[in-house]
Amino acid sequence: MATPYSDGADTPTMTEVIQGLTDLRDALVHLSLALHDYQFALYAHEDDAAALLKDQILEQARLHEPRLP
């Protein structure tokens, strides 16, 4: 059974679609920046920094995970 959206309909409103796409864009920007930092740390042979950045990437992914109603 589908979960109704804010207006009680079975489909999202355009505002909800746009907000979802905006959230997804923001998450992808954060992930891209984190991956860039992770790649830099790997090339610099900074194993500890790379491990820390990997943890940060995973945390950012969890925080910005798209939420379905």
Image (cartoon, rainbow, N blue to C red):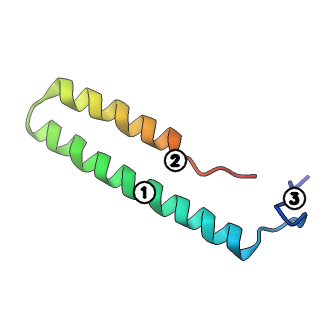
Marks 3 and 2 sit apart, C-alpha to C-alpha, by 22 Å
What residue lies at 86% left-to-right and 54% top-to-bottom? Answer: 3
* Residue at 9%, 32% in the rendered image: 45
Residue tagged 1: 28
Question: Disc 1 marks which amino acid?
Answer: Leu
| Image quadrant assignment for residue 53 | top left
- Relative to 58, does residue 1 appear above or below in the rendering? below
Quarter of the image for residue 48 reads top left
Give the mark nearer the N terminus: 1 vs 3. 3
Which three-letter amino acid code belongs to the residue tagged 3?
Pro
- Asked whether 48 or 19 is in front, the reply is 19
How many numbered marks appear? 3
**Left or right, residue 68 beside residue 54:** right
Mark 3 is surrounded, within 10 Å at the Cα level, by few (under 14), some (14 to 19) or many (20 or more) other residues, namely few
As measured in the structure, the alpha-carbon distance from the residue carrying label 1 to the one carrying label 3 is 27 Å
Q: Is residue 48 above or below residue 33?
A: above
- How many residues crowd around disc 1 within 10 Å: few (fewer than 14), some, or many (20 or more)? some
Q: Where is 39 relative to 15, above or below?
A: above
Dot placed on the residue nearer the N-terminal end, 3 or 2: 3
> Residue at 91% across / 52% down in the picture?
1
Residue at (89, 67) in percent of width and height: 9
Provide the residue designation for mark 3: 4
Q: Earlier in the sequence, mark 1 or mark 2?
A: 1
Q: Is residue 63 left or right of residue 17?
A: left
Q: Which mark is residue 64?
A: 2
When the figure is inspected, residue 23 is found, relative to residue 18, above or below; the finding is above
Instruction: Estimate the x, y position of residue 13 in percent, counting from the top left.
Output: 76, 72
